[in-house]
């Protein structure tokens, strides 16, 4: 853990970009790149090789959701932390489906941001209660919707639902662990699993769409 | 006059009508030629009739070209069109000869001029052209027969009716155009608002963040910016919900609860898809959640954190309100009951029961948590709309 975490900051507002960059650098992170829009972000990503991309959703095209998907495609080990001002719910959910593992609103404090970057870099998921509510709602929707999802229909285990619900009610991982008599790590694993299932379902859906449209030849990978 | 008559929508309607009229012109011309050939042996001046028919054919070609472009549809063209038709009617007795004029040389061909006036000058145009043609037609008849009367009647009635219909078509097209334009403007305004809102939210968040770090007076500024940020964000949520729910009688519960985020410390989690319920149910649920939050405000602290979670199921919704305060003291509920007054807790239970739902309260040193379960009748919501 002696090497500083490599971070890239993508935000179209110069003030914000500078503030976040300054905070990260002051806290000992290595800011390996900044970008003001989607195309800059994708152009600089391969050379900068950041571990964490701190990404604003509302950026000039390609938007945050597309950038997230492309970054994860190029480097599945990269982590995307969404930092959004307006927190448009549909966009946040799409970004998480595309592979983002963290979400913060911009009103979060400096310490919350630094903590979130550290946790996302470790492979943890950073959930706000709002995001947990969105993900929970998405699983419910898929469960209640028409059975078109067939055998790929993802479902949460009872325990996962319970944990996610507690996150949505604003409980910390520690509080949940105490309440359910589980280890902190186990709670984290449950939360991560819910996201993984959602992202996997998204990939399956995209692949099936590609096959149906005849766009992809090697869709099995 | 209505400003829509020369608008692009009205002109587009006229274009289509004049295209149809061009075809009609050829049909009535062929009809006139055929009838005149059939009666050629009765004519006093066959050459005169031939000249008249050639003039009609020439004018038909010219008029088709002239009416095709909106810019050429001038008063002069329409007057010439009508004048030629009247002139042909008036000279018919002299050229055709005979004691009893059965039909004029142009015959039904005059219809083209009448309809042109009805299309271009609408009801009034149809009436003027109809009356002019009728007067001309009747002036050349030696006797007033039932057939003559029928023709005259059709001209005077048909002109205004067709004119009225053209007017209605143009009006509807103009209205549709206006509605489409209004929708496009609204969509563009919403897009711009989103961009502006995002920018404002960015700045407010930044001020809030830096303010806290700087402390002192700046912290106060930061706090104010934070309040405005919450207020704006919940306003956007409510606006989005209003735009996406055109249904009468229902409201989006998620958006309505989301507006509660403007209270300090409150965080609301809801599904991304709208949760539509009858408006009274939504209003009451939001009011009850508001009462729970008031309680948090009173007993835990003014900006104590509180969390609201909405979950939607096919047959019911679940709303929970949680805080991390000291919980409701054991004795207080019993005390309220002893004193015979309805405590806040019982009031909340009662209001949820009135909605046909259940309310569960868990309280302890971990805090206080309400869980409301309210049934949703999926068949009732659409029925109340009708």
Image (cartoon, coloured by chain):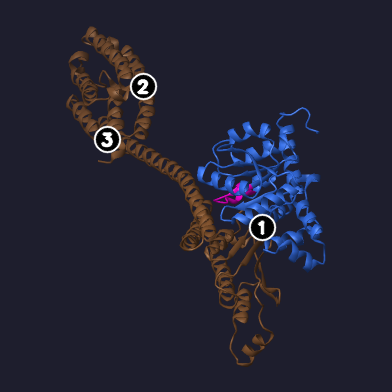
Q: Nearer the viewer, mark 3 or mark 1?
A: 1
Measure the C-alpha gap from mark 3 to mark 2.
Answer: 24 Å
Judge whether A103 appears above or below B25 on screen: below
Query: Is circle 1 on the same chain as circle 2?
Result: no
In the image, the segment drawn in magenta is A82-92
Residue A209 position within the rendered picture, expressed as x and y whole percent measured from the top left: 71, 36
Query: What chain letter is assigned to the residue under label 3?
Result: B
In contact (CB < 8 Å): disc 3 and disc 2 = no
Q: Is residue A100 above or below residue A221?
A: below
Q: Nearer the viewer, residue A94 or A99?
A: A99
Q: Give the colour of chain B.
A: brown
Is there one chain holding both mark 3 and mark 1?
Answer: no
| Cα gap from disc 1 to disc 2, whole angstroms | 64 Å
In depth, the one of B64 and B194 nearer the eye is B194
Q: Position of residue A89 (x, y in %)?
A: 60, 51
| Residue wearing tag 2 | B22
Tell me the tag on residue A189.
Answer: none
Q: Which of the numbered marks, if any, corresponds to residue B153?
A: 3
Q: CA distance from mark 3 to mark 1?
A: 74 Å
Label 3–label 1 contact, CB within 8 A: no
| Residue at the limit of the structure toward the top, as seen here | B47
Residue B382, given in percent of the width and then of the height, sits at 58, 58
Write down the residue under mark 1: A133
The chain letter for the residue carrying disc 2 is B
- Please give the letter of the chain rendered in blue: A
Local secondary structure at mark 3: helix
Is residue B100 at least partly visible in the picture? no
User: Mark 1 falls on what kind of element?
Assistant: helix
From this view, report whether residue B53 is shown above or below residue A1: above
């Amino acid at each position: 853990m002696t090497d500083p975490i490599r971070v890239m900051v993508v935000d179209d507002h110069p003030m914000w970009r500078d503030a976040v960059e300054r905070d990260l650098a002051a806290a000992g992170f290595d800011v390996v790149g900044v970008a003001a829009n989607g195309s800059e972000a994708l152009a600089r990503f391969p050379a900068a090789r950041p571990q964490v991309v701190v990404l604003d959703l509302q950026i000039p095209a390609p938007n945050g959701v597309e950038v997230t998907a492309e970054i994860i495609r190029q480097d599945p080990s990269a982590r995307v932390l969404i930092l959004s001002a307006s927190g448009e719910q549909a966009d946040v959910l799409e970004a998480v489906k595309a592979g983002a593992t963290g979400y913060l609103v911009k009103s979060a404090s400096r310490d919350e941001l630094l903590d979130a970057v550290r946790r996302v870099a470790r492979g943890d998921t950073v959930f706000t209660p709002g995001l947990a509510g969105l993900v929970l709602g998405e699983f419910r929707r898929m469960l209640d919707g028409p059975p078109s999802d067939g055998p790929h229909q993802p479902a949460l285990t009872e325990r996962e639902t319970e944990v996610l619900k507690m996150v949505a009610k604003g409980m910390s991982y520690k509080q949940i662990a105490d309440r359910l008599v589980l280890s902190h790590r186990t709670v984290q694993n449950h939360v991560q699993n819910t996201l993984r299932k959602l992202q996997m379902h998204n990939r399956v859906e995209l692949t099936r769409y590609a096959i149906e449209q005849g766009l992809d030849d090697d869709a099995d990978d | 006059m209505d400003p829509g008559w020369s608008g692009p929508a009205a002109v587009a309607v006229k274009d289509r009508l004049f295209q149809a009229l061009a075809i009609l012109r050829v049909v009535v011309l062929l009809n006139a030629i055929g009838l005149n050939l059939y009666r050629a042996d009765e004519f006093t001046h066959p050459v005169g009739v031939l000249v008249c028919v050639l003039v009609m054919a020439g004018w038909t070609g010219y008029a088709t070209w002239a009416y095709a472009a909106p810019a050429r549809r001038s008063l002069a063209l329409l007057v010439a069109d009508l004048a030629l038709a009247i002139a042909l009617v008036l000279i018919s007795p002299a050229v055709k000869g005979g004691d009893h004029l059965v039909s004029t040389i142009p015959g039904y061909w005059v219809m083209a001029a009448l309809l042109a006036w009805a299309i271009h000058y609408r009801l009034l145009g149809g009436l003027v052209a109809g009356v002019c043609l009728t007067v001309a037609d009747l002036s050349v008849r030696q006797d007033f027969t039932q057939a003559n009367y029928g023709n005259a009647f059709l001209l005077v009635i048909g002109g205004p009716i067709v004119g009225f219909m053209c007017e209605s078509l143009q009006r509807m097209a103009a209205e549709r155009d206006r509605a489409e334009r209004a929708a496009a403007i609204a969509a563009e305004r919403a897009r711009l608002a989103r961009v502006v809102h995002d920018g404002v939210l960015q700045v407010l968040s930044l001020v809030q963040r830096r303010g806290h770090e700087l402390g002192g007076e700046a912290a106060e500024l930061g706090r104010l910016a934070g309040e405005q940020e919450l207020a704006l964000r919940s306003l956007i949520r409510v606006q989005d919900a209003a735009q996406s729910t055109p249904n009468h009688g229902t409201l989006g519960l998620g958006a309505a609860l989301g507006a509660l985020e403007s209270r300090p410390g409150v965080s609301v989690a809801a599904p991304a898809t709208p949760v539509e319920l009858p408006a009274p149910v939504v209003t009451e649920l939001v009011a009850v959640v508001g009462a729970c939050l008031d309680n948090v405000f009173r007993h835990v602290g003014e900006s104590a954190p509180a969390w609201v979670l909405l979950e939607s199921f096919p047959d019911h919704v679940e709303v929970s309100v949680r805080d991390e305060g000291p919980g409701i003291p054991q004795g207080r509920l019993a005390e309220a009951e002893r004193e015979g007054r309805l405590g806040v807790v019982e009031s909340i239970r009662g209001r949820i029961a009135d909605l046909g739902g259940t309310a569960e309260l868990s309280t302890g040193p971990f805090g206080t948590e309400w869980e409301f379960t309210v049934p949703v009748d999926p068949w009732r919501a659409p029925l109340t709309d009708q």
